[in-house]
Image (tube, grey):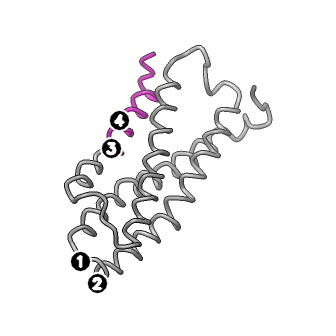
Amino acid sequence: MTVDALAPFYLWTKAFHLISVFAWMAGLFYLPRLFVYHTQVAPGGAESERFKTMERLLLRAIMNPAMVAAWLLGITLVLTPGVVDWRAGWWHGKMLGFLGMTVFHHHLGYARKDFLADQRRHSECYWRIVNEVPTLLLVLIVVMVIVKPF
């Protein structure tokens, strides 16, 4: 199903989709790094409280709106005639990456709530490793969209 009325707005939709994905990715790269630093400070101290504020603002003011915009604009692109060839397999890989980003985003949101309660469920080492997940997802998505190997 496509909506013909969306075709004239394709380039604008695509541009704003990419902008929202870039903003979202920036947050997905930065929030786990904040968690690395947050695990290094004592719970309940002034530094910990500063990290809590930074994490909240990053998640609520940048990441959440960017994720919603990326999803809505992505759905708009899918509904635009001629954008997706449903017989091709590349979009399955892209959607796998996009869904992975969404799951990762929610994982970070739950972790922020743990930090807010001064709980440290994961180690600094865990957050250093997890910090690489957005890069892997980015590689998958870009290869699927640009190279279209399937």
Residue 74 in magenta stretch: no
Magenta segment, prevailing SS (helix, strand or loop):
helix
Q: Is residue 12 visible to us here?
A: no
Identify the residue under disc 3. Answer: 133
Describe residue 95's horizontal placement relative to residue 52 as left or right.
Answer: right
Q: Secondary structure at mark 1?
A: loop
**Which residue appears at 49% of the width and 38% of the height?**
98
48 up-or-down from 78: above or below: below
**Answer yes or no: do the residues labelled 2 and 1 have beta carbons within 8 Å?**
yes
Q: Amino acid at mark 3?
A: Val
Marks 4 and 2, the one that precedes in the sequence: 2
Q: Amino acid at mark 1?
A: Ala
Q: Nearer the viewer, residue 46 or 113?
A: 113
User: Residue 65: image x %, image y %?
Assistant: 57, 59
Identify the residue under disc 1. Answer: 42
Residue 45, disc: 2
Q: CA distance from mark 2 to mark 3?
A: 29 Å
Q: Which residues are magenta?
A: 134-150
Q: CA distance from mark 3 to mark 4?
A: 10 Å
